[in-house]
Image (cartoon, rainbow, N blue to C red):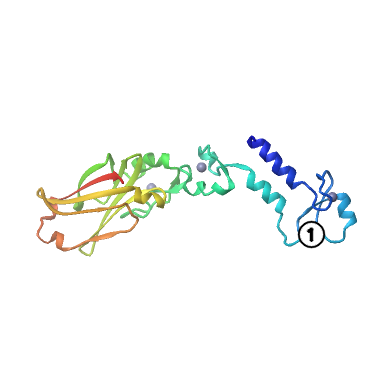
């Protein structure tokens, strides 16, 4: 059965009068609880035979079978959804989102837009931010605050915050929360080409604090963080 034929069947079922079982034609009367009854039957009965609640069950059944364009269609999404898949809109790539740097170190930004405009926004409005293409990056953590990394068709935001002598670090993925575990980020902290420590984790919105001991014996200006991002 084609989708249209199925839809027609759903509608025919729902326009069946619950009293005489014929398909209703105009005028169709609503009982006080929202059931549809044909005009003749409404005249003959004093109490609706299906009344249990105030919901419009006929319309709900039709709605369940209908196809909807994504609510972000005006931003470019061409997805067609049925009701059970409507959670698509939670992760729709055309859904407007906040500036990926909105809570990064030293940034206050109220911009909202679609993901495909991020690159333009970041390069024009956040000129102090490092922009990097590719999965491997080396940076001096003492002289860097925010870095946007375009890698694996995604955008990652790396932030470093030095506060009260402690070093806080975050590498987050711009995108749905569920995607965080699809990536692993390997970090190697180097001082004068000597490996001080290595750690691996998935991108996360949480800040981590580097242990102060890591920095005790190093000349800060030679501290290099090497980060490589992989699919898991
Ligand atoms: Zn009837
Ligand atoms: Zn009723
Ligand atoms: Zn969509
Ligand atoms: Zn911004």
Q: Is residue 20 left or right of residue 112?
A: right
Tag 1 secondary structure = loop
Q: Position of residue 178 (x, y in %)?
A: 41, 51
Closer to the camera in the image, 230 or 96 = 230
Q: Residue at x 34, y 41 (%)?
A: 123
The total number of labels drawn is 1
Q: Is residue 93 left or right of residue 149?
A: right
Closer to the camera in the image, 12 or 190 = 12
Q: Residue at x 33, y 46 (%)?
A: 156
Q: Label 1: which residue?
A: 32
Which quadrant holds residue 120?
top left
Q: Position of residue 78 (x, y in %)?
A: 53, 37
Closer to the camera in the image, 194 or 128 = 194
Q: Is residue 17 left or right of residue 76?
A: right
Q: Position of residue 141 (x, y in %)?
A: 20, 52
Q: Determine if the C-beta at disc 1 is less than 8 A from ligand 2.
A: yes
């Amino acid at each position: 059965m084609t989708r249209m034929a199925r839809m027609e069947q759903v509608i025919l079922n729902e326009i069946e009068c619950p009293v005489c079982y014929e398909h209703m034609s105009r005028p169709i009367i609503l009982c006080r609880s929202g059931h549809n009854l044909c005009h003749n039957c409404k005249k003959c009965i004093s109490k609706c035979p299906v009344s249990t609640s105030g919901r419009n069950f006929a319309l709900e059944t039709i709605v369940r079978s209908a196809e909807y364009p994504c609510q972000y269609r005006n931003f470019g999404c061409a997805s067609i959804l049925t009701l059970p898949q409507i959670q698509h809109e939670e992760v729709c790539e055309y859904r407007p989102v906040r500036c990926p740097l909105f809570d990064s170190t030293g940034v206050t930004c109220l911009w909202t837009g679609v993901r495909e405009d991020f690159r333009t926004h970041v390069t024009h409005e956040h000129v102090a931010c490092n922009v990097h293409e590719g999965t491997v990056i080396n940076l001096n953590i003492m002289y860097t605050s925010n870095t946007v990394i375009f890698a694996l068709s995604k955008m990652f935001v790396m932030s470093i915050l030095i506060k009260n002598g402690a070093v806080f670090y975050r590498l987050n993925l711009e995108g749905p929360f569920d995607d965080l575990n699809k990536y692993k980020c390997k970090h190697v902290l180097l001082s004068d080409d000597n490996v001080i420590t290595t750690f691996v984790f998935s991108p996360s919105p949480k800040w981590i604090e580097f242990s102060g001991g890591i920095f005790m014996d190093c000349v800060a200006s030679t501290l290099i963080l090497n980060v490589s991002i992989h699919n898991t």
